Amino acid sequence: MARKLTKALRGKRRWVGLQFEDEITSRQAFQDRLNAVLVPLELLHDTRLMDVMPSSGTNPEKSELGRAILCVRLEDAPKVRHALEPADAMETHGIQCVTTSGKIRLVRERLGLPRPKRRR
């Protein structure tokens, strides 16, 4: 008889908080840029883009960065962080890792993102 799939046996994930250039104005544009960075890493599992908030761009004098949350599996998290965490990642890719956590709530708090409304 197979073991029951408990919480401890499920796959672990990490939530990665990202910031990106204000030139990226849509979710699809961000997804394309992110795929260009992640595909060469040959990750074991698929990633999932959760929240994307492009910069408002209302104040041209102050450059505001967009923010996003990416869900990655625990095994792939070190590769993603290594690619997006260095200080020159913003100049190289236009995306930089700001924070990671095992809880999406904490990443949203750190990035200042609101919790989206539930769809029913």
Image (cartoon, helix red, strand yellow):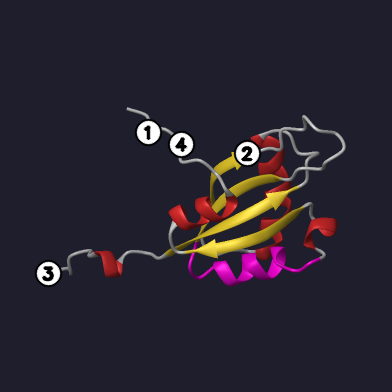
Locate the C terminus and report the quarter of the image it occupies. Answer: top left
Residue 33's x, y, as percent?
73, 46
- Pointer 2 residue: 53
What residue lies at 64% left-to-right and 46% top-to-bottom? 67
Would you say the residues marked 1 and 4 are in contact, meaning their CB atoms lie under 8 Å apart? yes
Q: Amino acid at mark 2?
A: Met
What residue lies at 68% left-to-right and 71% top-to-bottom? 82
- Pointer 4 residue: 116
Would you say the residues marked 4 and 2 are in contact, meaning their CB atoms lie under 8 Å apart? no
**Circle nearer the N terminus (4, 2):** 2
Q: Nearer the viewer, mark 3 or mark 4?
A: 4
**Circle nearer the N terminus (3, 1):** 3
**Snapshot quadrant of residue 88:** bottom right
Residue 92 seen: yes
Q: Amino acid at mark 3?
A: Met
Q: In the image, which residues are magenta?
A: 73-87
Residue 2's x, y, as percent?
17, 68
- Pointer 3 residue: 1
